[in-house]
Amino acid sequence: MSKTAAAVLAFFVLTLFSIPMSAQLIPHGNVYGGASYGQFTDASITRQSYRGWNASAEAIPFARLPHVGFVVDASGFYRSGNSGGNITQYNFLGGIRLSASLGKWRPFVHGMGGIQRVNSSGIMYNPPAIDVGGGVDYKLFFKNFSWRFQGDYLRTHYASANQSDYRGSTGIVWRF
């Protein structure tokens, strides 16, 4: 057998053995989009319900640390005020997410910081925000798609008052 034929045979054998190993590769990240429901405290310490959206993107940059990802998160909530004014709230956050894969389930926890932008009948304020939360992704039968259930605790501080908000989200995840 010539050296060229041996090299070609070795190349094809190595390629065949690497195909099953490609299923073991860790995803590089994911993108999420879904509907969200929030319970927020206003300045008069009353709880109000809001509906809106939530979206995030996660990057898993280190092959040796497959459980650590960097995430950016944005959400928007809307409510028509009782006195005719409208209230909108946007959250822009970034931080670290820790996750693990357990069969079809991928539970995760995250900690993020950022800014909240609130417009209440033309009065705007932008307090800093801290978000702690987690959830779980369930792999769907479509390749690279999951369904996410997520819950978060969002804390802000504005004008010497602390605000504790809660949000729940669900939607589709595309892993890449």
Image (cartoon, rainbow, N blue to C red):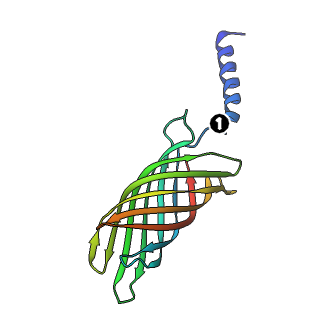
**Between 77 and 39, which is closer to the camera in this rendering?**
39
Residue 46, position as x, y percentages in the image = 43, 79
In the image, residue 133 above or below residue 103:
below
Q: Residue furthest front?
A: 160
**Between 85 and 1, which is closer to the camera in this rendering?**
85
In the image, residue 101 above or below residue 32:
above
Q: Residue furthest left?
A: 123
Q: Residue at x 33, y 71 (%)?
A: 118
Residue 102, position as x, y percentages in the image = 69, 47
Q: Quadrant of residue 161?
A: bottom left
Q: Is residue 130 left or right of residue 27?
A: left
Q: Quadrant of residue 26?
A: top right
Residue 45, position as x, y percentages in the image = 41, 77
> Label 1 crowding class (10 Å Cα cut-off): few <14, some 14-19, many 20+?
few
Q: Residue at x 54, y 67 (%)?
A: 168
Q: Secondary structure at mark 1?
A: helix
Q: Residue at x 55, y 62 (%)?
A: 151
Q: Residue furthest top?
A: 2
Q: Residue furthest bottom?
A: 83
Q: Is residue 89 left or right of residue 61?
A: left
Q: Dividing the image into 4 quarters, which one contains the N terminus?
A: top right
In the image, residue 158 above or below residue 146:
below
For disc 1, the marked residue is 22
Tell me the kind of residue under disc 1: Ser
Q: Residue at x 51, y 42 (%)?
A: 60
